[in-house]
């Protein structure tokens, strides 16, 4: 519930009718895990989820949300935000409760404020059923966190382009070996792996002799791993729900052939040679004080570089600046980099993309 349809391109104005239609179809066809979080859609995702689920769907799904750990400055804050989330979601329990986007700095904060006592008590009194964490940092930090508490599950970024990124394959296997259920996020890398697919990439798929849509290929790659318990897909329209549900009906661990797996290796090499910035469009960097819509620019930069469209995009650069802010106006405050789960050098990249599109 992170990339929902919106009204007038405003992330805070979720199209609730369209979202309800998506959720109802998904649940009717076997989807039973709904994932939201405090900041999604400018803090509007949780209230919308609560309204949709209260109409007969709540007991048909596992409801997951995440504690906004960046706002936690005391032990009491854990309970404060959980209480507010229960009210927003109109429920008396959260089935799957995560500490959100942990990394080195946030992990130190969790230890300081006794996260373990909070989770133990919240599980004991029934406010949450299962305790987990989502993660964006290096492998060593991931293993440290896995070993520090009796977690029920974890959530990591994993897709065919990120096999060695953050927790990666080794982290996936490590968590599974410790008895944690593993939830995978960003299986399509924020949609970057399935939109505007280059003809050369499609040609690689076609050589396998199997006809599938790009999302079908990418999701099957994740599900090919037996250690993956659950895959999250940030679907933005009903057609995507229908397509992904159909894929889930037949995808399974070990379901890809040797020829198909080799095709993924060729495609990885293709993308790595062309990608400018590893942005997943998560929007954690937003809002920018200078009103620069950073994810839009990074997505545009990648599109231009990967698909040979620099000249086309450069023609519209002035109009882009009017609609999405001026990258050259970056005040270098660093707020975006502090929030970025990918730890991207955003300020440096903004200068580079400005030069790329402006020709300066």
Image: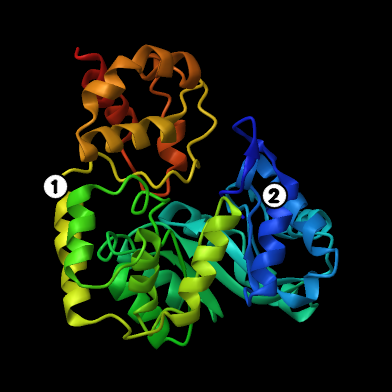
Relative height, residue 29 to residue 213 (above, below) = below
Relative height, residue 272 to residue 290 (above, below) = below
If the image is split into quadrants, where does the N terminus sit?
bottom right
Q: How many marks?
A: 2
- Where residue 105 sits: x, y (%)? 45, 52
Q: How is the image coloured?
A: rainbow
Name the side, left or right, on which 235 lies relative to 76: left
Question: Which residue has dot 2 on it?
Answer: 18
- Residue 95 image-quadrant placement: bottom right
Specify the label residue 273 is tagged with.
1
What residue is drawn where x is 24% and y is 30%? 309
Look at the image and tell me whether residue 354 can be seen. Answer: no
Q: Secondary structure at mark 1?
A: loop
- Where residue 283 sits: x, y (%)? 49, 41
If the image is split into quadrants, where does the C terminus sit?
top left
Dots 2, 1 in contact, CB < 8 A: no
Q: Secondary structure at mark 2?
A: helix
Front one among 57 and 212: 212
* Crowdedness near tag 2: few (<14), some (14–19) or many (≥20) residues, C-alpha within 10 Å: some
Relative height, residue 81 to residue 208 (above, below) = above
Front one among 333 and 297: 297
Name the side, left or right, on which 226 lies relative to 339: left
Sequence-first tag of 2 and 1: 2
Relative height, residue 320 to residue 112 (above, below) = above
Real-space Cα separation, disc 2 to disc 1, in angstroms: 38 Å
- Where residue 107 sits: x, y (%)? 48, 59
Look at the image and tell me whether residue 105 can be seen. Answer: yes
* Crowdedness near tag 1: few (<14), some (14–19) or many (≥20) residues, C-alpha within 10 Å: few
Name the side, left or right, on which 215 lies relative to 39: left
What residue is drawn where x is 47% and y is 46%? 282
């Amino acid at each position: 519930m992170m990339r929902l349809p919106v009204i007038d391109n405003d992330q805070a104005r979720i199209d609730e009718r369209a979202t309800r239609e998506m959720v109802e179809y998904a649940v009717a066809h076997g989807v039973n895990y709904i994932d939201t979080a405090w900041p999604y859609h400018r803090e509007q995702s949780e209230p919308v989820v609560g309204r949709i689920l209260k109409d007969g769907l709540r007991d048909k799904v596992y409801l997951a949300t995440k504690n906004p750990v960046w706002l936690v400055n005391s032990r009491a804050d854990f309970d404060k935000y959980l209480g507010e989330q229960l009210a927003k979601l109109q429920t008396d329990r959260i089935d799957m409760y995560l500490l959100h986007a942990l990394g080195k700095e946030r992990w130190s904060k969790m230890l300081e404020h006794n996260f373990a006592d909070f989770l133990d008590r919240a599980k004991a009194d029934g406010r949450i059923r299962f305790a987990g964490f989502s993660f964006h940092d290096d492998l060593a930090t991931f293993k440290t966190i896995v070993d520090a508490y009796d977690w029920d599950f974890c959530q990591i970024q994993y897709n065919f382009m990120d096999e060695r990124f953050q927790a990666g394959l080794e982290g996936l296997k490590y968590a599974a070996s410790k008895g944690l259920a593993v939830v995978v996020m960003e299986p399509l890398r924020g949609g970057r792996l399935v939109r505007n697919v280059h003809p050369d990439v499609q040609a690689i798929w076609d050589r396998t002799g199997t006809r599938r849509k790009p999302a079908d290929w990418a999701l099957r790659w994740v599900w090919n791993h037996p250690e993956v318990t659950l895959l999250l897909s940030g679907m933005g329209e009903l057609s995507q729900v229908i397509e992904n549900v159909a894929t889930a009906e037949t995808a399974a661990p070990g379901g890809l052939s040797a020829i198909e797996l080799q095709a993924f290796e060729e495609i990885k090499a293709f993308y790595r040679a062309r990608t400018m910035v590893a942005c997943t469009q998560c929007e954690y960097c937003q809002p920018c004080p200078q009103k620069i819509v950073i994810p839009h620019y990074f997505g545009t930069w990648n599109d231009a570089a990967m698909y040979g469209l620099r000249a086309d995009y450069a023609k519209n650069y002035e109009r882009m600046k009017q609609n999405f802010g001026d990258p050259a106006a970056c005040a270098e405050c660093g707020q975006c980099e502090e929030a970025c789960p990918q730890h991207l050098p955003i300020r440096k990249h903004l200068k580079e993309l400005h030069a790329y599109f402006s020709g300066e």
